[in-house]
Amino acid sequence: MTKRVLTLLLFILVLRVSVKAQSSQETDSTQMAFLPALAFNTDLGFIGGGIASFYNYKDNTRPFYSYTNLSAIFSTKGLASVDILYDKPFVFGTNMRLKTNVFVSRFFQDPYYGVANYRVIEEDPPNGMPDFYQFKSFSVGFNSTLRIPLSINEKNQQLDALAILNLDYETPWDSKSDQLMTREQPRGFGGGRTFMIGSGLIWEGRDNEFNPTSGAYIETTLEIGNKLWGGTFNNLVIKHEMFHYFTFYLIKDITLANRFYAEHTSGETPYWKLAYAGDDETLRGYPSRRFLDDNVAILNNELRAWLVEFPSVDTKLGAVLFFDVGRTFSNGNTFDEITSDLKYTIGFAGTASLFTPDFIIRGDVGFSEEGTGVYITTGYMF
């Protein structure tokens, strides 16, 4: 689960202030939107904070000339995070799009269940050791992605190339002897930097980015970290993700949504860069980062439907049924070993679309062999 929790927002209030730019063009403007945040997540607790978004419109550029997002969130389990995102289409006067993100995070109850630990874990930690599966962490990072259009067809489906630069630093602090993190001391326990350079491809063929009902999306990336350009570790990360959507009618329009995600890591990979499973983005119902290992393969399946609509106020209420399956595994495992211990979760969600079809509030409840996860957030999982 990412610590840059930008999507854990329950909509309360939106204030839009349009300030005309000092320009002769009437279309030039800056709009500010402020959203107080209130959410809940089993792994983070209750979450509060706020997010301020600045949309700069200029020279008839679409979807905007530039976009800046400032967010600060705090949780009852000790997460404090500040994040700045800058999104610039048509950067340097080209058709390329640049996204840059800077974050600082501190977490008092960061979870750690061990690397390649597949034993069933009881809900409660060992007697007398309430912090056994927790540790305190501090992280800071800079991520930048340049999206380069390669082709677009008559159906508005697009193939893009990616150039990636990721830098981050993480370290545990104030570690205690009775914590699993201190006992195992995985790679990165003493802190360290990752400096990743990479590339990738994206195929965008969905009918809608926020509320898709048909089409597909594919993204593949490769990132390399090396001590030669400033990192603490020599490591490799390969990620592959696919979404597919199909809608059929059975009393209501029902969308079958499928996601396949796979990640491979090798080399001197610190614990925070290992592939993982468990949280609201992987196996819903398992604790955050419950499984850590060299690789992960996950299949998420959802049935989505809008059940009640209120056209006069642009509001819809819906439901989701989901089934997640997958696991992490070590490099060198055989196919039989990988498929012999798959992890499964099932669950349901309630959804609400407020004021615009693109703004969706979602509450997931997932059930696993080791417990239940509750996640209130915005947007679909994929």
Image (cartoon, rainbow, N blue to C red):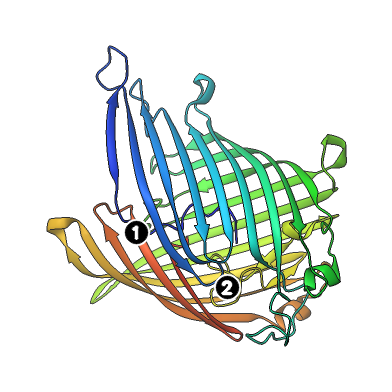
Mark found first going from the N terminus, 2 or 1: 2
Local SS, label 1 = strand
Q: Toward which corner of the image does residue 110 lie, by quadrant?
A: bottom right
- Front residue of 15 and 131: 131
Q: How many marks?
A: 2
The residue at which mark 2 appears reads as 283
Judge whether 257 appears above or below 97 on screen: below
Q: Residue furthest top?
A: 24
Residue 379 seen anywhere in this rendered image of the structure: no
Q: Is residue 277 left or right of residue 9?
A: right
Q: Where residue 187 appears, x then y in whole percent?
A: 84, 59
The residue type indicated by label 2 comes to Leu
At a point 73% along the width and 68% down the height, the residue shown is 292
Judge whether 280 appears above or below 89 on screen: below
- Front residue of 340 and 348: 348
Local SS, label 2 = loop
Q: Where residue 35 appears, x then y in whole percent?
A: 36, 48
Q: Residue furthest left?
A: 312
- Front residue of 94 and 282: 282
Name the quarter where the N terminus is drawn: bottom right
At a point 83% along the width and 35% down the height, the residue shown is 229
Q: Residues within 10 Å of mark 2 (few under 14, many from 20)?
A: many
Residue 273 seen anywhere in this rendered image of the structure: yes
Residue 186, numbered circle: none
The residue at which mark 1 appears reads as 360
The residue type indicated by label 1 comes to Ile
- Front residue of 18 and 216: 18
Q: Where residue 106 appears, x then y in whole percent?
A: 64, 54
Tell me how far mark 2 sits from mark 1, CA to CA. Answer: 21 Å
At a point 67% along the width and 45% down the height, the residue shown is 140
Judge whether 369 appears above or below 54 on screen: below
Q: Residues within 10 Å of mark 1 (few under 14, many from 20)?
A: many
